[in-house]
Amino acid sequence: MDFKKVERKWQKKWEKAKIFECNLSEKPKFFITFPIPYLNGSMHIGSGFTALRCDCYARFKRLKGFNVLFPQAFHATGEPILGAVERLKKGDKLQEETFKLYGATEKDLENFKKYGAEYVAKFWAKRFKEDMKLAGFSIDWRRSFLTALDEHFNKFVEWQYNLLRKKGYVKKGTHPVIYCPNCKSPTGDHDRLIGEGESPLEFIIIKFYLENGEILPCATLRPETVYGVTNIWVNPSIDYVKALVNEEVWVLSKEAAFKLKEQLKKVLVIEEISGFEIIGKVAENPVTKSKVLVLPAEFCDPKIGTGIVMSVPAHAPYDYIALIELQTYGEELKKYGLDPEKIKEIKSISIIKTKDFGEIPAKEVCEKLGIKSQKEKEKLEEATQLLYKEEFHSGILKENCGEYSGLKVSEVKERLTREFIKRKIADLMYEPSGKVVCRCGTENYVKILEKQWFLKYSDKKWKELAKKCLKKAKIIPEEARAQFEVTIEFLKEKACARKTGLGTNLPWDKEWKVETLSDSTIYMAFYTIAKIIKEKKIPASKLTNEVFDYIFLGKGDLKELSKKVKLNKMILEEMRKEFEYFYPVDLRNSGKDLVPNHLTFYIFHHVAIWKEKFWPKGIGINGFVNVYGDKMSKSKGNIIPLRDLINKYGSDLVRINLVASNEGLNDANWREESIVAYSSRISFLFDIIKKIKNAKREDVKNIDIYLKSKIQELVRETEKNYEELKFRSAAKTGFFDSLKEIKWYVERNGGIENCNKKILREVLEIVVKMISPLLPHIAEELWSCLGKKGFVSVSTWPRPEKVDKKVLELEENLKNLIEDVKNVIKIAGKKKKCYLYVSSKSELEHLNEARDFLKNVLGFEELTIFKASDKKRYDPQNKASKAKYGKPGIYLE
RNA sequence: GCGGGGGUCGCCUAGUCUGGUCAAGGGCACUGGUCUCAGAAACCAGUGGCUUAGUGCCUUCCUGGGUUCAAAUCCCAGCCCCCGCACCA
């Protein structure tokens, strides 16, 4: 059977009949959404999995009698499309391959380069839509739009941000970010060649004073160790600069001077000075007032911190090793004008007590790891980590630490930093927590962005509302709820705008663009009116704040508003009605990676803007799709575009194989070999429907009642499974198990000719309905094969009917009996005659009805059933005495 | 490191909240059989071990402990996997 041909046929019919276009109606509505995909490619099995779950659910709810709104828009906000075009222009092979994988031709790639990001976005939006249509999505496409590139949508985002600002949820601030000087923008995790996961790390600069009043700024992560400083390290072979930093003269590396400027300090370089020149000078510790020497060390890196390091040999392995090495040098020190004897006199100052280490922890660690030279960087890093952890968590400052003596390191660090800064003997600077290289190949540093706009997710009231919303919302599966709870709790300020990329300008500060995650929070509301905007060709200029206030918040006077913006009253009213009817979103389903960001923001913004009535009602979460147990990724080259699979197998097989591949938060698995399980059962269905006319029997037997009851049970289970988005279970109960029962029924009747025509047909109709959310095209085809008019997609979920528990039990017992007899045959060998002894009348009747079937299936020439109490029975071994209800006595001979 | 979710009989998955009905459901794979000239498909049966006139027992649900008459399920510890940790879709 040519699935693809059948699928195209039904897709055309659906489209022509407009059955998925959803309008205002008297019926209860159900609003379901799948997050807008970003347009740097088309649908792959990952996004397909999540989206198809939505479609299956939408189809199920439609059968359940809801007026289901399932719209779909697309996302172009942000940087990556621009980045992709840039990479194409540079001839990036991976980018070319990625686009080609999704079906772009050489010609398309040329166009991408020629026409730029907007073209690319629109190209993929079109592809996406085509692919989704091929997969049989039941979407109302009239409501589609494109973020960032659609001016109507931009107005909507402006409205949202104006409102949030008015409510005090948007505020200005400064913030350190990892920054690329080449791209002139913050470098997100996804934009990094090296350094994923690294973030700005706060260093404390402690100002040591030279005799001439100039400052040696020592950058450190451990300000408390200032009490144990024995000397200062400067790298003799690098160039430093003298610079005016916030009115003071600092000596620091060139790189540091540049970075400090980027971190909002006033920096004016006065002159260059070599490291060599500084060595031998004496500096004063601003905290302890002790005088320390400036000594040479190779490990001082001009790229890290200020290039000047305070030496704490008791607690820092680098310092310890450098000092030991230096103390062995002797005469060579004279070229720096240093006195070897004085160097030898330098003693470590121990200031932190821990339970695991003794007096000089750095010495212990270095000896333990066998570190001999400051060139052994890897080992030194390890030693530093080890020591830092121990001293931070369990260390206590000794009596030589002034007012902080006796306090825990972990508790004192913050406090001491604050106080040092207040006393102006310390300052802050930031470095990336590890090396970060941007995709463009440039090494990054930390820049403090000024006057950045933030969403105030830390706001207590806002959090409370979000928690309330979550509490009332249905989360499927429940396991995902905990993650939402902690996210709401811990969410802090979030930058909501950036200066580059595509997006909507902040209405009050046009140089900023609302960033991706921040512009995609309440767009579901826009679906309700997007159709009308398009149909009535409303110009974006008319979508003022007041208009949106009216539509979404019911504010303002309709007559006045209509006059003011010159927009027909009816149109305004219609939009308001659509919103009121369809909102809130009943179910939003997405991958688990969006829980701590998008989905939580979605909750936050809804509660900020709307009353409880319009808050999100349900959120569904699923895992990712692995390909044969492997994570899907660009670099592994195992991304499978949905279209490729549809071309190979047809939509329905792909749909069910994907959607039913797993449940819950676990990752799903794409395994092509599972497809045969579905295709063979589909063939069976077509086969039996073709032969249904051969069924002749009209009287109703136990076996007919059994089938009807059993299917009823399965309908109930399947309904429950669908309701909980358990599509794997739904496929099992609604498809596999039902077919098994039908097969059994036919076999029990000894062939289709002996089946009850009416009942078999009824049951098949039920099964076709049950599988239609998963296999919509095939279900339509089967529906028409059954001679039904119209679409099964818009029919009704099977009505619940009575279940005859007694007959179900009798048949279950019969199945067990067959097993038992077979077991006996296995042990006793094959016999010709079989005698069964039953304990009740109902069993006698039931088994007698099935006698011919039993005889055949068990392979006896003769099969006789007696009541156990029958005095005239043939029973040489008195097996009747073994008979219990549900377990007849068996005698073979 | 922190937070969240997990680890089931060859593979993928159900069962865990609410302990017994669980040697544990379904699919795939494999083995045997029916059908067939043959193959494929389809259908039936089997797939931890030993036993047995329809049974009984032993060893299993990441590892190690514990609670209980009874543990895949509850508690504790450890190991491993996945997701997220922000300006990024």
Image: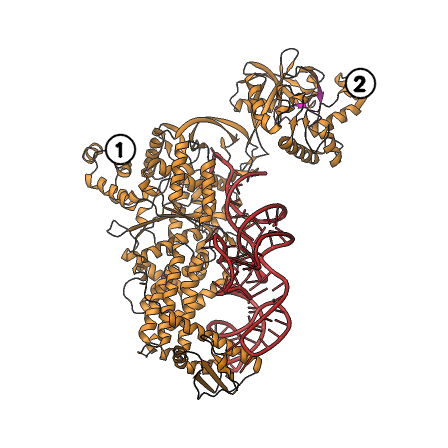
Q: Mark 2 points at which residue?
A: A341
Mark 1 belongs to which amino acid? Glu
Q: Residue furthest top?
A: A212
Residue shown at 70% from the left, 36% from the top: A379
Residue A308 shown in magenta:
yes
Spot the red chain and give its letter: B
Q: Earlier in the sequence, mark 2 or mark 1?
A: 2
Using the image, tell me which numbered label, if any, was put on residue A546: 1
Numbered disc 2: secondary structure: helix
Residues at badges 2 and 1 in contact (C-beta under 8 Å)?
no
Give the total number of marks visible in the rendering.
2
Magenta segment boundaries in residue numbering: A292-314
Chosen colour scheme: by chain
- Quick one: label 1, few (<14), some, or many (20+) residues within 10 Å? some
Q: From the image, state the color of chain A.
A: orange
Please, which chain is the residue tagged with disc 1 on?
A
- How far, Cα to Cα, is label 2 from label 1? 81 Å
Quadrant of res A309: top right
Report if residue A32 lies within the magenta region. no
Task: Classify mark 2: residues with Cα within 10 Å, few (<14), some (14-19) or many (20+).
Answer: few
Name the kind of residue labelled 2 in the image.
Glu
* Label disc, if present, on residue A806 of the rendered structure: none
Name the residue nearer the viewer: A697 or A113.
A697
Residue A838 image-quadrant placement: bottom left
Quarter-of-image position of residue A654:
bottom left
